[in-house]
Amino acid sequence: MSRAIENWLFIGLLLVVLIFAGRPASFMDREPVDFAFDLAGLVISMLGLLLRVVSRDWKIVHGDGCLVTDGPYSVVRHPMYVGSFLAGLGLCVILGSVPFTIIYSIFFIVIHVRIARREDKYMDGVWPEEHKEYTAKVPGCVPSFAGLIKIITSYRGWISSIPGAFNRERSALCGILVGACISESASDILTFGWAVVHLEVMIWTGVAAVLFATWLLLYFRQKTAKAH
């Protein structure tokens, strides 16, 4: 099964689960709690997105046909998947549904463990000795305590890659922000009812539409520039 099919299968399953298990928890009906979950979810999503885009950019810049074992890849072997998981988890927190969050986590782990194992097997074949040594030293997706300390103490070395990383991952950034708007709208409607939050939902929908339109504009501008 290709990566594209696996990704669409994952998204499709989550949409089905959202219909049946996406109702926010009862404690979300208090405004301070709702706001706290929205803020926490947005922070988690943005941190996850930051990890994903920096890791991708780091591999592009430092790869050059060799096994990348420094930067984010010195903390975990699959930092992009960790970032993607956190980005989605943040949207789950904004939605505020405990069952949906649990199911999302299970689906993500099951699907991406298979993908990570395939990638490890491929790298074992390309860099057998180097990857074996790398695997023995660096965990797959859950960082060690020493790895967390390394993130804190060496973050300055990664900052320079952030602008280029976000420029390459504009689609992911747009997707997370649009997803946050949609999650917030769904959470408010299911918790408080359309009559109470219709104005707020319309605002969030408008923000999502502007973000998506901006992404489309940048996308087609880039395509036009490449064509010339």
Image (cartoon, helix red, strand yellow):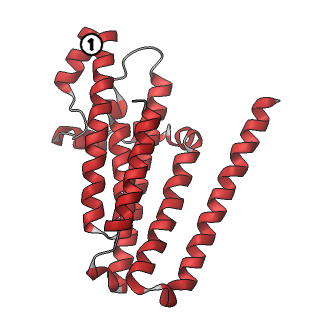
- Please report the residue visible at 41 percent of the width from the left and 44 percent of the height from the top: 9
Q: Residue furthest bottom?
A: 195
- In the image, residue 119 lies at what x, y percent? 33, 24
Of residues 121 and 218, the one nearer the viewer is 121
- Please report the residue visible at 70 percent of the width from the left and 47 percent of the height from the top: 218
Q: Quadrant for the C terminus, please.
A: top right
Above/below status of 206 relative to 217: below
Count of residue discs: 1
- Please report the residue visible at 28 percent of the width from the left and 32 percent of the height from the top: 114
Of residues 183 and 7, the one nearer the viewer is 7
- In the image, residue 175 lies at what x, y percent? 52, 53
From the viewer's perspective, tell me whether residue 187 is left or right of residue 227.
left
From the viewer's perspective, tell me whether residue 89 is left or right of residue 145.
right
Q: Quadrant for the N terminus, please.
A: top left
| Residue corresponding to mark 1 | 130
Q: Secondary structure at mark 1?
A: helix
**Residue 195 at least partly seen:** yes
Above/below status of 116 relative to 176: above
- In the image, residue 192 lies at what x, y percent? 41, 86
Above/below status of 58 relative to 184: above
Callout 1 crowding tier (Cα within 10 Å): few <14, some 14–19, many ≥20: some
**Residue 77 at least partly seen:** no
- In the image, residue 76 lies at what x, y percent? 27, 34
- Please report the residue visible at 49 percent of the width from the left and 55 percent of the height from the top: 176
Please identify the quarter of the rendering in which residue 75 is found. Answer: top left
Please identify the quarter of the rendering in which residue 83 is found. Answer: top left
- Mark 1 is on which residue type? Glu
Of residues 151 and 134, the one nearer the viewer is 134
